[in-house]
Image (cartoon, rainbow, N blue to C red):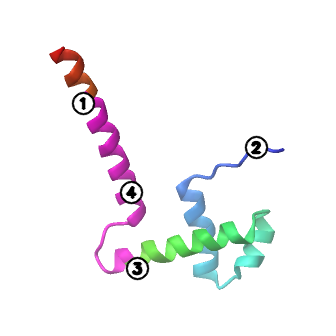
């Protein structure tokens, strides 16, 4: 079994932009780049959502998820530090 490939958010956005900005189909972009259609389709959906949020003046949903994850990790870290210093 091959290992799973990882793509940066910028690459995902660029691939989605090929579909959204050039009028190319998801199938043709996926084929040209050697990617699965479902993966490219998911990236296009996320990019549409991101662009819609920007147009409406809302924060990027993916950035919000990242911030929430960071805050959860930070609060767990500080809770453990506080617990270790108060014992």
Q: Which residue is mark 1?
A: 78
The image shows residue 57 at horizontal and vertical percentages of 28, 75
Q: Nearer the viewer, mark 1 or mark 3?
A: 1
- Asked if residue 58 lies in the magenta stretch, the reply is yes
Q: SS of the residue at dot 1?
A: helix
Tag 4–tag 2 contact (CB < 8 Å): no
> Where does the C terminus fall, quadrant-wise?
top left
> Where does the N terminus fall, quadrant-wise?
top right
Residue at left 65%, top 85%?
Answer: 23
Q: Nearer the viewer, mark 2 or mark 1?
A: 1
Q: Looking at this view, is 20 or 84 the one in front?
A: 84
Lower sequence index among marks 1 and 3: 3
Lower sequence index among marks 4 and 2: 2
Residue at left 60%, top 58%?
Answer: 11
The answer to whether residue 34 is left or right of residue 87 is right
Lower sequence index among marks 2 and 3: 2
Q: Nearer the viewer, mark 2 or mark 3?
A: 2
Q: Which residue is mark 4?
A: 65
């Amino acid at each position: 079994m091959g290992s799973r490939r990882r793509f940066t958010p910028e690459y995902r956005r660029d691939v989605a932009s090929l579909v959204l900005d050039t009028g190319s189909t998801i199938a043709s972009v996926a084929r040209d780049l050697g990617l699965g259609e479902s993966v490219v389709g998911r990236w296009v959906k996320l990019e549409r959502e991101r662009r819609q949020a920007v147009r409406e003046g809302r924060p990027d949903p993916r950035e919000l998820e990242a911030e929430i994850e960071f805050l959860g990790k930070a609060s767990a870290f500080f809770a453990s530090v506080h617990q270790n210093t108060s014992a």
